[in-house]
Image: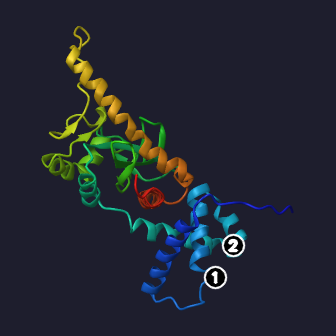
Amino acid sequence: MIAHTAILDVSRDLAGHLAWLLHAERRRRGTRAHTRALSCFWQAVLGLRWLRDHTNPDKLGRDHQVSRATAYRYVDEVITVLADQAPDLHQALQQAHEDGHASVILDGTVVTTDRLAEKTTSVQGTTIDLSYSGKTGEHGDTIQALSAPNGFPLWVSDEEPDSTHDLTAAHEHVLPALYAAAAHGLPTLADGGYDGTGIGVHTPIKQPPVTQVLDADNRAYNALLRGLRSLGERGFALLTQRWRAMGHITASPRKIGPILQAALVLTQLEHPTT
């Protein structure tokens, strides 16, 4: 066995803030002092290691001298207390309005998971895997998100099975609030997958039939929209590349939403003035 030193590249202030949240949760539950294997701070470190580097819970248990089951439970508690701090949709839009943003960017992504056995019936009447997407060719869940014009993430939705179209998921989670925000001067930019969402949500103008061409004004509009909206890709990159646990989820797919919401809270804590 060769021992080595590792450094977790998150600030002590971030770990301290998470430890405070865990302490508040233990007090809420009535947990007695000295009855936990780890202090709030070291539980925070354990959870941050999982979120940051997707460290295997077996290894986390060995490193922190707790059982594998305890490591899993501590990670779940970290996810829960962080997700509880995530802004809801109306809070995120209100903050965007107060910050003077000219628009918000709506986008969706697929977080892959292990194969699921749950089935559903397609629009053609055939039986399909609920969490399989023909578009991506993988199993997972889809997440909707809003970003600021510079691509900084503002809000993420709960998960929907990957067989759910972006437009359907948007109708379920976000569109009604976006219409109200647009009426108060905060429009939304989105890609062609959201075509038909309605007034206030700007999507590219579709190409005409083969025998026709898009006129110059519409081509300029599409180019401008594409350039502004492309920054929304930065939002998911900040969440999934900084917090690598989002790369592929082996836990229950129903935890995808809370895990991404936990990553959102950590990102906003690390960049409070972005």
Q: Name above or below for residue 220 compared with residue 202.
A: above
Between residue 4 and residue 76, name the one nearer to us. Answer: 4
Q: Residues within 10 Å of mark 2 (few under 14, many from 20)?
A: some
Residue most extreme to the bottom:
32
Q: Secondary structure at mark 1?
A: loop
Q: Name above or below for residue 270 compared with residue 145.
A: below
Residue most extreme to the left:
183
Question: In the image, what residue occupies the spot 54% across and 72% down?
Answer: 16
Q: Name above or below for residue 71 compared with residue 128.
A: below
Q: Does residue 112 appear in the picture of this structure?
A: no
Report the side of 126 relative to 270 (left or right). Answer: left
Q: How far apart are the alpha carbons under marks 2 and 1?
A: 9 Å
- The reply to whether discs 2 and 1 touch (Cβ–Cβ < 8 Å) is yes
Q: Secondary structure at mark 2?
A: helix
Question: In the image, what residue occupies the spot 39% across and 50% down?
Answer: 153
Q: Which mark is residue 245?
A: none
Q: Of the residues under marks 2 and 1, which one precedes in the sequence?
A: 1
Q: Residues within 10 Å of mark 1 (few under 14, many from 20)?
A: few
Q: Position of residue 128 (x, y in %)?
A: 40, 43
Q: Position of residue 52 (x, y in %)?
A: 58, 57
Q: Which image quarter: residue 98? A: bottom left
What kind of residue is marked 2?
Answer: His
Q: Position of residue 152 (x, y in %)?
A: 40, 48
Report the side of 53 relative to 104 (left or right). Answer: right
Q: Which image quarter: residue 230? A: top left
Q: Does residue 216 appear in the picture of this structure?
A: yes
Q: How many marks?
A: 2
The residue wearing badge 2 is 64
Between residue 271 and residue 86, name the one nearer to us. Answer: 271
The residue wearing badge 1 is 37
Report the side of 74 relative to 157 (left or right). Answer: right
Q: Name above or below for residue 235 compared with residue 9.
A: above
